Image: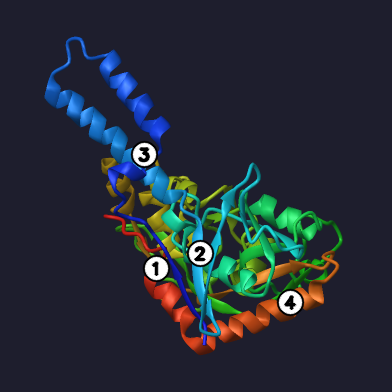
Amino acid sequence: MMLLCFSARQNQSTSSVKPNRLVSALGFIFGTMQGITLPLILVVYFSVLEVAQAEESFDNLTVSYYSNEQQHTIQGIKTPQGYRFNEDSDKVINLATLNWPPYISEAVCNKGWVFQFTVAILVSKGYQVNIHFYPWARSVMLVEQGKMDILFPEYFIESSAPSDAVLGKKRRELLALSNKFAGGDLSLLKRKGDSFNLQADLGNLKGKIIGVVRGYQNTPEFDAMMDSKQFAVVEALDELQLVKLLVAKRVDLIIGDPSVFIYSVNYSNLSNRNKQALLNSIEKIEPALKYNHLYYAISKNYPQRHQLLDDINLALLEFKQSGETDRFIEVGSGCTLDF
């Protein structure tokens, strides 16, 4: 049986903060003390200290797991291109992903449960793991063109889905899908108070203006209507931009995972007042369009793709049977966020 756990280091002591950050903070404080009261100095000091501790926690890349009753601890490193684990292995794979909280994001401590889960299953099979964050459309392009080895987390790809990165090719001609693992709902969202009841056949989407994230798969029915231009589409880079478009009345509806919309707003750089205003202005349309499982999409240009696919599928099965997939979802990133 395999047991996995990830340390979060949420309550680090003052001594764990990197010395150069404290020196810089103290230098700034004492260099500007003239005319500043002691309480204000203390507020500034502890604010800087809190930020430094938060950054330290977010930089924690230690992964510990048990396999065959033995504990294994892997220390990841930040590289100029991303994050690397198990660097001594010569079974090197490069993965392309996106910021998609709460599932995965550089803005979430421990990078989210899908990040942790992915590192764990691949390291457990002996791979060196290199994870790179890009906008989703670029991640898709890099893997479909064979410049990266794995795209994740991906929705199911229909056999008819065309590639935007390689003209004249279907996506399934370029990518091999793993077995599925846990995902989330895919829903339409509207402005709160707007009267719109979704028809089962999606017929009343015709003529609407709908916001989508560029490069995302949705549902076969929705994507078929989009491809045949039965409604107008406004493309966004991410979920936060979609929410802003909806609230600004530049689109009638937006589509995506409701939990991602919530987390994207809350992890943004907006003020708390603006975050609350955005979230209070939108609502999910019931029922959800579907539940979307997640997948790993492996580039068919990867030389050992068949072995890699077998290893991933075996690890997915082992984690599911041991209950560790459910544990990852329940624990999440190991962090809390006050919404």
**Which residue carries the number 2 mark?**
63
Please state which amino acid type lies under the numbered disc 4. Leu
- Find out whether the residues at labels 3 and 1 contact each other: C-beta distance under 8 Å: no
Please state which amino acid type lies under the numbered disc 2. Val
Of callouts 3 and 4, the N-terminal one? 3
Q: Which mark is residue 309?
A: 4
* Residue 114 in view in this figure: no
Q: Where is residue 156 in the image (x, y as percent from the top left)?
A: 64, 74
Please state which amino acid type lies under the numbered disc 1. Ile
Secondary structure state at the residue bearing disc 1:
loop
How many residues crowd mark 4 within 10 Å: few (<14), some (14–19), many (20+)? some
Snapshot quadrant of residue 148: bottom right
Q: Where is residue 273 in the image (x, y as percent from the top left)?
A: 26, 42
Cα distance between the residues tagged 3 and 2: 22 Å
Q: Nearer the viewer, residue 275 or 133?
A: 133
Cα distance between the residues tagged 1 and 4: 36 Å
Nearest-to-viewer mark from 3 and 4: 3
Secondary structure state at the residue bearing disc 2:
strand
Cα distance between the residues tagged 3 and 1: 40 Å
Cα distance between the residues tagged 2 and 1: 38 Å
Of callouts 1 and 4, the N-terminal one? 1
